[in-house]
Image (cartoon, rainbow, N blue to C red):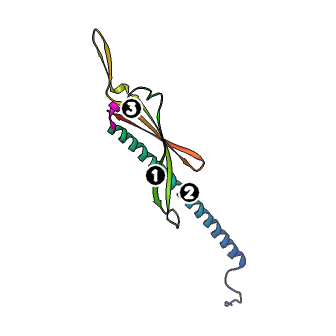
Amino acid sequence: MDVLGKKSGFGIVEVLIAAAVLGFMYMALLNLQGGNHDALLRIRGRDGATEVAQNLIDSLSALGIARLSDANLAANPIVISDIERTWKGQPGAIEHDMKVLYDAEITVSPDNEYAVQNSTALQSVKHVYAKRLDVKVSWHFKNSVQSITVSGVIR
């Protein structure tokens, strides 16, 4: 007891209010951590899709323009399914592998910016010295399909 004869300390109401405030703060932190985890997975998925698209463009560029004929390429895109990328990760307390499956659709078309028209009295010839690649890479994230499109030019 203090000098005036009253007891000092915390009452039950104060303790319950403090516990409720701490509970709300804990739930907010859990929600924030879940949002950060989803953002990390979304960014990893997009980075992997960019890598897949760039690898496909580089591979087709290595083949050269002569290997990509104009016959049906613009009308029939090249489709590649189940390209897998794996990352080591530890978004929680347990380390695990994160695997994402990607699907790619490649459309090759002549680009008018890279065409030359030669005309003589007897004939007119259009020469395309580069082709445009449009690579659309898609993957599943949660209950939706995410996708990116990367363009490139093969000369």
> Where residue 51 sits: x, y (%)?
41, 47
The amino acid at mark 2 is Gly
Cβ–Cβ below 8 Å for labels 1 and 3?
no
Q: Which residue is mark 2?
A: 35
> Where residue 81 sits: x, y (%)?
49, 43
Front residue of this view, candidates 107 and 31: 107
- Magenta stretch: give its range: 63-67
Left or right? Give the position of 44 relative to 131: right
**SS under mark 1:** strand
- Which residue is located at x 71 percent, y 90 percent? 5
The amino acid at mark 1 is Arg
Identify whether 24 is placed above or below 114: below
- Label 2 crowd bin: few (<14), some (14–19), many (20+), radius 10 Å: few
Residue 44 is inside the magenta segment:
no
Q: Which residue is mark 1?
A: 85
> Where residue 105 sits: x, y (%)?
47, 37
